[in-house]
Image (cartoon, rainbow, N blue to C red):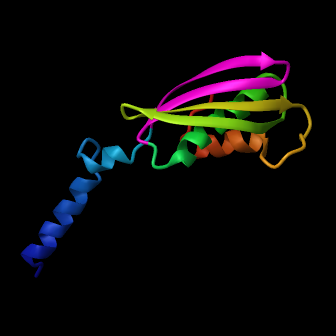
Amino acid sequence: MIRAATISSLLLGACAQVPGSGAADRSTPEYKGVETSLLNGDLVRFNVAMSGARSEADLDDYAECAAAQYALIRGYGFARHVRTKMKQEGGVQTADAVYTISPSLPRGLRTIDAEVVVADCEANGIPTV
């Protein structure tokens, strides 16, 4: 026999997972778009915006996904992170990220293999350019 407390717990748990039920919405990222601008040669700026980021890492991942896809679109296989500036206004987090793109693996600590990163972004539901 199932006790009333158990039924209540099951119902509350089910409600917490329904979209639009409050708390679940705050942890669901909403990707609001990417603006890309070529700064100079291989230097590219990505302005990304999202709401519902769980941490700055979510916003950083979004910018990295955009940079990786952009590198592939331009016929390059790699990118290197230069810098990122982040801010939050009215529940929307934004990042101004700069990357270099290149045909071969660049020097530096934060390099990315564009094909690997784009595949990872797709697997995790993060949009690219």
Membership of 46 in magenta stretch: yes
Q: Position of residue 109 (x, y in %)?
A: 81, 49
Q: Quadrant of residue 66?
A: top right
Q: Residue furthest bottom?
A: 1
Q: Position of residue 78 (x, y in %)?
A: 83, 37
Near-viewer residue (3 or 109) = 109
Span of residues in magenta: 30-52
104 vs 70, left or right, is right
Q: Position of residue 4 (x, y in %)?
A: 7, 74
Near-viewer residue (54 or 129) = 54
Q: Quadrant of residue 5?
A: bottom left
Membership of 39 in magenta stretch: yes
65 is higher (above) or lower (below) than 54? above
Q: Position of residue 49 (x, y in %)?
A: 50, 30
107 vs 3, left or right, is right
10 is higher (above) or lower (below) than 33? below
Near-viewer residue (77 or 49) = 49
Residue at 56%, 29% in the rendered image:
48
Quarter of the image containing the C terminus? Answer: top right
Quarter of the image containing the N terminus? Answer: bottom left
Residue at 40%, 44% in the rendered image:
28
8 vs 65, left or right, is left
Q: Quadrant of residue 64?
A: top right
* Main secondary structure found in the magenta portion: strand
